[in-house]
Amino acid sequence: MRRPLPPAGLAAAALTLAGCGLSDPCSGYQFQRLERFSRPYAGTWVVARGDTLTFPDSPPMSDRFRLTAVVLDTATVVAGRDCMLRGRIVFRAPRAETLAVTWCGQPEQAIVTGWPADLGPFAGLSLAPSGGDSLRGSILFDARLGVRVRPGVTAQFVAGRLSSAP
């Protein structure tokens, strides 16, 4: 005959099982906030105009970058312990390529990350609403890669939504 667990043992067993379970960062309250804040940014954004990004002190990186489009999808991806959304950024120059990135929206901006280090010292993009169907974007520099950018140096662009439906 088995003896029932005392109440303290039952509570300890429940805590152990709860602690061992895998938690899904793409569920619950935080994910609902991420989804709600990201919704206005989702879609395909075509770059209408932008600054030329050159580095006079670094000839290999002094090519003109031509960002063509930013595609912000609503499919989720787990990155470490965070839930992020998938996206792509499309370049025409210095080489034509499409990069897979992750992003998340906040009320005042969306942050796009995931640039490969060989492209340069970039941390990603900061995107902010600019009117009904436009975004203003800024390229973010990654100080961890040793780049020293003078304060105030930015590379900005304006993009319009490809269609009005996200």
Image (tube, rainbow, N blue to C red):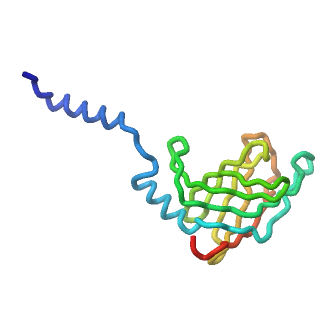
Vertical order, 105 against 144 (above or below):
below
Q: Is 11 in front, or is 42?
A: 42
Q: Position of residue 123 (x, y in %)?
A: 70, 49
Residue at point 15%, 32% (across, down): 7
Which quadrant of the view contains residue 93? Answer: bottom right
Q: Is residue 153 above or below residue 58?
A: below
The C terminus - image quarter: bottom right
Q: Residue most toward the left?
A: 1
Residue at (79%, 70%) from the top-left corner? Answer: 49
In this picture, residue 156 sits left or right of residue 63: left
Task: From the viewer's perspective, tell me whether residue 118 is left or right of residue 84.
Answer: right
Instruction: Name the image quarter holding the N terminus.
Output: top left
Q: Residue furthest top?
A: 1
Q: Quadrant of residue 132?
A: bottom right
User: Which residue does the image show at 55% across and 65% down from the upper left?
Assistant: 107
Locate residue 137, reporting x and y percent.
Answer: 71, 64
User: Residue 51 location in percent, x, y?
Assistant: 82, 64
Of residues 24 and 123, the one nearer the viewer is 24
Name the side, left or right, on which 92 lies relative to 85: right
Residue 73 pos. (x, y %):
58, 60
Numbered marks: total = 0
Q: From the viewer's perspective, is 38 left or right of 31?
A: right
Q: In the rendered view, would you say 121 is above or below 16?
A: below
